[in-house]
Amino acid sequence: MNTKKKGRWLANLLNSEKYSSFTVSVLAIILTLITASVLLLLMGKNPLVAFRSFLQGCGFLPKANYGGGSGMLSDLTDFLNYLAPMLLAALAFIVGFKAGLFNIGIAGQMLLSGFVATIVIGYNKNLPAGVAKPLVLIIGIVVGGLAGALIGFLKYKFNIHEVVSTIMVNYIISYLTGFFINNKFVDMLTRTSRVCAPAARLTLTNIQIGGVNCKIPFGILIAIIMAIVVQFIFDRTAFGFELKAVGQNKNCAKYIGVSVGKSLVASMAFSGILAGLAGVTYYLGYTNTIIPKTLVGMGYDSIAVALLGNSSPVGSIFAAIVVTVFQQGANYMSSAVGVAKEIASLITGILLLYASCGGYMKGLARGVIQKDLDREAEAKRAASHKEDAGQGKEGER
Amino acid sequence: MEDYIVEMRHITKRFPGIVANDDVSIGIRRGEVYALLGENGAGKSTLMSMLFGMYEPDRGEILIDGKKVVFHSSNDATAHNIGMVHQHFKLVDNYTIAENIVLGSEPMTKMFGFLPSVDMKKANREIAELSKTYGLEVNPTDRIEDVPVSVRQRVEILKMLYRKADIMIFDEPTAVLTPQEIEFLLQIIDGLRKAGKTIILITHKIEEIKKIADRCAILYRGRLVDVLDVRTTSVQDMANMMVGRAVDFNPHKSEPDYRGTVLKVDHMTVKNENHFEVVKDVSFEVRSGEIFAIAGVSGNGQTEIADAITGMLKIDSGTVTLGGRDITHLTIRERAVEGVSYIPEDRHGTGVVMDFTLRDNLALRQYYRDPFSRHGILNFDKFQSYSETLIDRYDIRSGQGPKTIIRSMSGGNQQKAIIGREIEEHSKLIIFVQPTRGLDIGAIEKVHRQILDERDRGAAILLISLELDEVMELADTIGVIYNGQLLKIAPASTMTSHDVGRYMMGVKEA
Amino acid sequence: MTKVFTDGLSFAIPLLIMAVGAIYSEKSGVTNLAIEGFQGFGAFIGALIAVLLMPVLGNGSQAVIYIAMLAAAVGGGLYACIHALLCINFKANQVISGVVVNILGLALTTFFTSAANTAINGTASNKFVLGVSTRFTVPGLSRIPWVGGLFQNMYPFEIIIIVLVVFFWYLMYRTRFGMHLRACGENPQALDTAGGKVELTRWIAVIISGALSGIGGICFAYSILSQYSPSIYMGYGYLAIAAMIFGNWNIGTTALVCLIFGFAKSGGQQLCIAAGLPSNYSDLFLMLPYILTMLLLIFFSKKNHPPKAAGEAWDKGRR
């Protein structure tokens, strides 16, 4: 009896309109932590120590000791520096997803806009910061937007599945930018592209706060503003209303007079804009250089963020923090506990797996509740049957 | 005890939220035609799906030849020589007729003497023979997607015969047939009875029961009301029992009062995505205050006519004029603003966004304009008040009012929401496609009333329906479509349903 | 020129077996964007077994390769169960599931490759060095002018895959199972009422899809550098899906498309060498298969007829 009640309590939480998205995400995180703990235990490591060191690596908890000039605050600003492109990339996925499109080419769009911004503005030594930084953002918006719009156009005009086309375009971008970097912009020492001028960089480095070296990422401001903007667009505007209609039922959207083609292109362009912003905050913020022929894993991590945040823009802020803790804290965890840092991606992958089962969990919960309701109804019916038993017999004849 | 071939005792079946069958007991005699009569949602199909092994009853038992059986799948039912023709045919479109018939019990042979493979040659031969024996003409190598509905139904019947079924269940078999095809089908059923088969006929059409059935069980809201001898019961009594109250067979329909021409379709040709002409050189006019009904067998281009007028499909040649203005090249929204409302055939696929709330679905025609949105920002207060008005005016029932997700509502209420939303536009032209499909009789009556009211208000109504009864009941003018062409346009009063049926099968002027 | 044929074929054939895997899944009604993940995970298991067996069987042993192929098939098939479970039983969105399986696959293989290397030889390397596969030349046929290259320096696995493709063509178009599978993807209700088992058929189809992708993956590993690393699969799974789309879900035409892809790739490389361009320029030619894919998609996507029921979860209760 007790367990049944407990089950129903969880089911109610999962099924409730208000809390369900939140509960599903929290459940996914808990399941992931359990799975990761089992994995760590199998490797002979203490999971609690490992999780603590993830948090320490991100500046949420103090480390045992710090190197010269760095402290908790430097770790925290590093974390925010990485969080910014992560959140923007997740927003990019969400915008496409709401309109029924899977933009898994975010990494490519990031690379292209980061590359163009680097060679056009980053290598221009003469621009003052006040001009260079806005120009970098504008380039990110324009290049990302165009790259996204192309995918939307191909989908609408030629019926090309965006998952296939974005992957193809990813590799084309990767090789193309790789070719140019290797031939024209390479730093012979590091084999990556030459670093950008500090004036163009969206993150201020080597800022002394309270005696420690910190970074000030403008990206995080942009990311949070964009999260609110995206939320507003989908909640309150006719444009967002149309995109949601297209995403959920293209036929109906067409029927009520929405131009489905334009909406697909618009949503992919919007998604591309956000990916472009993620690109410039990554390549001209978090890093200051581009590794040729390499697509960042963030393109996929952002999908985990978006699904974990139940594709809610503001919800993704919290989801992005969770995923970024694993990604950004992995280095310190690796040195502190001695587990390969690739475990961060594995944990993200597991998180993604559980998050994608959200619909099923909700369905299970609904089933449990419905069964209870049916049982009650059955009991009531049986009671009323007894009452009019006389009539019942006559009916059967 | 009688000698029943099938007995179902105290069957109860519930689905999440509803009781589909509530303690139903029936017995069917060998070699009879046994009809199950009831409205949509009365539980007829569910009851028979259990006999066919598609569901298992929550309670109660099934006896075949006096022996208790438990069916876990339709395989088990097939093993007991039970067959079923479903209302929506269960056919694989890109398979041949023979492949469809043998699917699940394929004759096998050995390729190169050792590799097991399906023996299609044998299948084709056997099916040709079978179709000859029972007078069900088909060409075994035709693909299903290339043959008309009536042939598809024959394939379903052959499927049962191929599996040597003795008990045959027909679920609403006449819903999509012309009167002539219905007569042919009833003859086939009679022939099957004479060959010793037991037939169970699920239907809501009382005339058919009168014509062919021996006995008739009436279901109402999941419960068995009565079992009647068809010969000794009147049509009116059966109807009353089926609906649970007295039925008014003919809605009061006033004399038409035509005013000016609203819709003029002139030599319109429409091609589908495969560049195939689905509407060929069609011309007609609909006047204010007139119900113009297009009758025809499914798939003859009628939905494409509606789609072309509303802008969902591109018009290849010809013109469409609304109230004197050429709207041939306007966008869907421009046409809607100009005065076209559209109740589409596919309620779930086109009419609503299933995971939107009722409130948002009711605002789908308005959301982009003042006062629903200003400068692109939505005004939800207006959304709310508008939806409350419509819910009230059109009696839309839902669990939680405006914020109900429309997916969770019943089909009838979803349709009420769509009709309400479209009527509320007060358009010059309202197009209804299959407006009562899947609704129960009470809801059907209401929809018919609404259509007549709009006509009397002065709207031009284009009604497209596969139900000939509906066309005959409502139309002022009937156009019959066959193979993309309007073969005949005439005042409804000058045609009988048999005349219309003849044109529906492509017979030109007699 | 002969090199174009030789290399092109050794790329096209593993691609084909993966495309056949994709066809199996989609024809049964399960949209499958997870080929990339199946291939990576299957190849990982195959390579792991190979690395473990090589010291036992001797470094040059060719038997290892065949055991690795078998292991890759098993590994890919097992990993495919995740996709099957999500799509068939959990009724998750099949596109999301595919993407999730790919991302998880990459993460799993990356982590466990270095973990396995640490366990085996103490260094956290991100690759398994595999033995070199012998090659053979078909006497006679290889001397045919122009196309002789097709029969020179062939890998034994190419023959195995061709035999497998023929077998899976037969299974799909000539057997009872194949007939049920194709019905599943067009109208599962039809199969269900005819007494077939929709969910079981789909499960088998997805597992076949995983097994074939695993074989494709390990063969790529052998043919590219004789080593396995999670990062050698440059979107090949998606190329296989693209090949399936142009091939209109038909094994025969898909085989043709795979050949075109293979020759485009090897042709690009040879062109780069023939033109005497510095190796830096090879990046430009490596883009060719992807650009070609985009162009083909632009010209052919509209006319396609994917299986009708693909992408929809099947619910027995729904009619």
Image (cartoon, coloured by chain):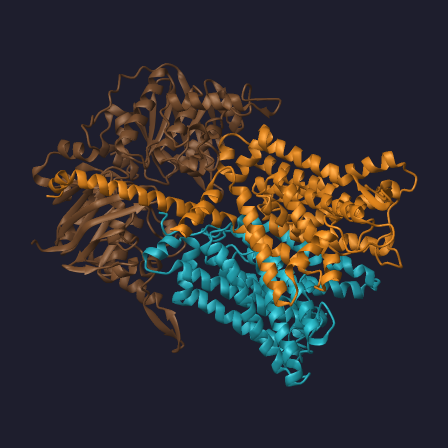
Residue B312's spot in the image, x, y percent?
49, 33
Q: Is residue C114 visible?
A: yes
Drawn side of residue C297 relative to residue A178, left or right: left
Image vertical order of residue B278 relative to residue C131, above or below: above
Write the residue at 50% across / 66% down: C208
Write the residue at 43% across / 34% down: B406
The colour assigned to chain A within the rendered structure: orange
Q: Quadrant of the N terminus of chain B?
A: bottom left
Residue B92's spot in the image, x, y percent?
38, 54
Q: Is residue A297 visible?
A: no
Q: Quadrant of residue C220?
A: bottom right
Residue A14's spot in the image, x, y percent?
48, 44
Q: Which residue ends up furthest to the right in the rendered image?
A: A126
Q: Quadrant of residue B142?
A: bottom left
Total marks shown come to: 0
Of B405 and C157, nearer the camera is B405
Image vertical order of residue B142 relative to residue B240, above or below: below
Of A28 and B361, nearer the camera is A28
**Which chain does the brown colour mark?**
B
Residue B82's spot in the image, x, y percent?
23, 57
Drawn side of residue B218 relative to residue A367, left or right: left
Write the residue at 38% across / 31% down: B398
Image vertical order of residue B325 relative to residue A169, above or below: above
The colour assigned to chain C within the rendered structure: cyan
Q: Quadrant of the C terminus of chain B?
A: top left
Image vertical order of residue B439 relative to residue A190, above or below: above
Of C190 and C120, nearer the camera is C120
Drawn side of residue B304 relative to residue A171, left or right: left
